[in-house]
Image (spheres, grey):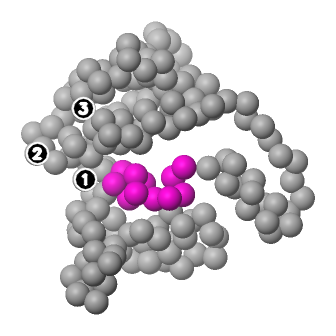
Amino acid sequence: MFIQEQEEYWAEGIPWTFIDFGLDLQACIDLIEKPMGVLSILEEECMFPKATDTSFKTKLYDNHLGKSANFQRPRLDKKRKYETHFELVHYAGVVPYNITGWLDKNRDPLNETVVTLFQKSSHKLMAGLFENYISSEMASDPKAEGRRRKSASFQTVSQLHKVSPHAR
């Protein structure tokens, strides 16, 4: 994403000094986005009505703890004001995450009016993030056969992010 943003600055003629982040982030991207990655497990847990934050955390640990260098058990830090469930190692360093409420937030359907506004945004990145969103009208339109995908009422934020070409 950072590389794409810098390329967009260059394409628009905005004076910019290229920043080399110096990290190969592919392992972290895979941990988040690939099958059985963080987003995939989140999406899977959202399908089960009895899933909890604890069951989500357990699946994350079962699939990634000790198997991915980018996924870590949280370090004890008495300065933190909130509980930490896991840590990811990525471009920003070691970042703690609290998953409380992730399942509930991801189960909320995207508001089509808001998504339409984002799609019409003059900012290419914002518009691009939502270009693959299929509205409920498009999902049921037989003329849009080539674009039919999961119904909009079932699209979650994590699902939309996974299919977005701009997520990389």
Residue of label 3? 56
At 25% from the left edge and 53% from the top edge, which residue is drawn?
Answer: 107
Residue, far front: 146
Tell me the amino acid under the disc marked 3. Phe
Decide which of tag 2 and tag 1 comes sooner along the chain. Answer: 2
Tell me the amino acid under the disc marked 2. Pro
**Badge 2 element:** loop
Rendered view: 111 above or below 50: below
How far, Cα to Cα, is label 1 from label 3? 13 Å
Rendered view: 13 above or below 2: below
Q: Residues within 10 Å of mark 3 (few under 14, many from 20)?
A: many
Rendered view: 107 above or below 41: below
Residue of label 2? 49
Q: Is residue 160 magenta?
A: yes
- Count of labels in the image: 3
Residue of label 1? 107
**Badge 1 element:** helix
At 34% from the left edge and 54% from the top edge, which residue is drawn?
Answer: 159
Q: Quadrant of residue 13?
A: bottom right
Q: Main secondary structure of the magenta part?
A: helix
Viewer-side residue, 143 vs 106: 143
